[in-house]
Image: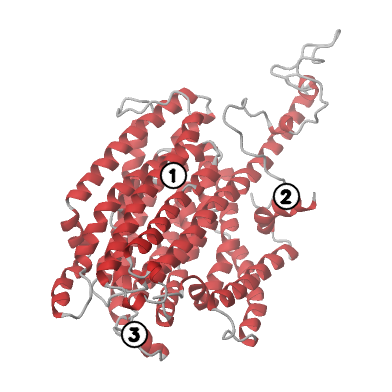
Amino acid sequence: MADERTEPDEPEEPGDAPRRSPESVAEPQNEPSPDANLDPSGLSAPADGAETLEEADAAPGSDAEDALAADRARKDVEADRAGGAGSGALLVAAGIFASRVIGLVRDRAVAFFFGSGAFADVYRLALRAPNFLQNLLGEGTLSASFIPIYSRMLEEGREEAAGRFAGAIFGLLAAVAFGAALLGVLLAEPFVAVIASGFLQDAEKLQAGTIVIDRYDLAVQVTRLTFPMTAFLVLSAWCLGVLNSHRKFLLSYFAPVAWNVALLAALFGGAYLIFDDPLGIGALDVVPADQLSRLLVAVFIGGVAGGVLQFLVQLPTALKLMKGFRPTISLQVEGVREGIRAFVPVVLGRGAYQLSGYLDFWLSTFVAAGALGAIGYAQTLYLLPISLFGMSVAASELPELSRISPTELDRFLTRVAGSVRQILYLIIPTVVGYLGFGFLVVGAFYQTGQFDLDDTWQVTLVLMAYSLGMIATTAGRLLQNAFYALNDTKTPAKIAVWRVVVSALIGAGLMFWFDRFSVNEVFGIPSEGDPLRLGAVGLALGSAVGAWVELWRLVGALRQHDAAFRLPWAAGLRMLGLAGLAAIPTAAIRWLVPAEPFPIWAYGIGVIAVYGLSYLTLGHLFDFDESDAWLGRFLRRLKR
């Protein structure tokens, strides 16, 4: 748990001997060997399985045995609390941080070349179009149907059975993913027509000269590339499941860096080869639309290469960890049928999320151009803290929660509540920061090239709307994993439907109302060309409301297991107060130091850094237990 001060053990390396009990790990180096002095002449035989003098002295039924058992249980709990939500979460966060940072660099480059208009709409749609493969078959589904079963087999010492199970899941995933990818390539035209119906109007507008590109035609071209790319990303998620189950968190979450680097290389390499003015620097406003279209196609050619790289980066380590692995397509392998039974409800639940996402995209194609782009840019910033501070804890906790016996419900739910506190400690200040300083965040990362001041304000408002649901989304992700660890995949799937319905109804109504207003009208910014409108803000607000409805129902469902279960809202209020204190010096700097002499990226990063450092410093000074969980390891190492 986050309230422990014990430094967690390092993850076990593949090929090591089985991990000994926590007390033996901490033995001094000069401890007598297990064979040396356990049975000295004239004394009774040692306790069965004894490896230390203390264990040898604990004869069955003696007070010494009871004391040793109690001490072992205490140390097991301490190690358990310090483990999953400690070192594992930090490793996941480190990997996610690296991939998200390079992802921000990628999005800044995309913003430079394509801004927040029609080309950005196609870019976001192309990423989203085959995304159902990754969400239905990838990490989220494997978290429920693969990791708990595989982790349980490892915990029971049945490594050969675990390897055979992993091989069967790999074969089934590959067959389904590449089969679906082939269909996506062949049916790209009707697929794009369904999910982006508003793009079908572009052909007439192009002939009338009111727009410069046909978004539908371009979207079909790039979607044919993103389907095979996503099939490889699904196999990459299988590698992630294997690595996480073996507590190898860093590589699996660092691997997406390869995909992002490939996209960046294709973007800049394509610009150099395609543009008349290499890189188009200083002349983006006069780059012909056909050259920008070719550049977008080049980006997703790089995406295919990146998907292959992301898979291959993880595969050697995953193969090294497994015993008995052999790819098969069989339902007879132990665990496969159980995994499929868990898989189906999760697919339905994930399908509900996908439906919600596609409804948002479908609706946004009927409002002013730029809505899709604004949603995509805002979601990158919105998902960054969710991934770093929410998914890192949720992902590292799932294997640990799966190892807890169903009979130990109190221990299970106590661990869940502690993990929620750890998530809230960094999510709450992020929400406060986005609401108070979101304009600087968006400007620092995106305002460049074709991405102007009106783009910054549009994306800022969308980001603020999404942020209202960030706490519910991150806590909800952890509670979903708690149900998966309890072998209950149906409950979160049913609750996901509620989120979809609420998000769609509220988002659709607000979208059309907000689309009546433009950024230029609201902020008095001069308009160049078609003004950017605010329909995407309504969709984001609907998403936020849906997230809170989902969290409310997930908590209610967990309370059916234990009526005493509560989320740690009192701790959350203390963290909110801490974030408010940290915002005071930040707001003072924002008020007293003018932004004009500085580039917006430098000013924005400076102000954001002051806020982040203020919060972390105050948390350490006020001795928040969660601060020690996130920062304690590093501070202790600095003192060595």
Can I make out residue 374 in this image? yes
Q: Which residue is located at x 37 percent, y 41 percent?
A: 235
Q: Are marks 1 and 2 in contact (CB under 8 Å)?
A: no
Q: Which mark is residue 484?
A: 1
3 or 1: tag closer to the N-terminus: 1
**Front one among 203 and 541:** 203
Secondary element under disc 3, as helix, strand or loop, is loop
Tag 3 residue? 518
1 in relation to 9, above or below = below
> Dot 2 corresponds to which residue?
5
Question: Relative to 415, does residue 162 appear above or below in the rendering?
Answer: above
Q: Which residue is found at the position 32% from the left and 56% from the top?
A: 300
Label 2 residue SS: loop
Query: Label 2 vs label 3: CA separation?
Result: 52 Å
Quarter assignment of residue 329:
top left
Residue occupying the point 55% across, 58% down: 567
* Closest to the observer, 539 or 479: 539
**Circle 1: is it few (<14), some (14-19), or many (20+) Cα within 10 Å?**
many
Q: Residue at x 24, y 62 (%)?
A: 219
Q: Secondary structure at mark 1?
A: helix
Quarter occupied by residue 454:
bottom left
At label 2, counting other C-alpha atoms closer than 10 Å, the crowd grade (few under 14, some 14-19, many 20 or more) is some
Instruction: Say which label, 2 or 3, has the lower sequence index.
Output: 2
**Type of residue at label 1?**
Tyr
Q: Nearer the viewer, mark 1 or mark 2?
A: 2
Q: Nearer the viewer, mark 2 or mark 3?
A: 3
Q: Distance of mark 1 from mark 2, alpha carbons?
A: 28 Å
Classify residue 610 as left or right of residue 638.
Answer: left
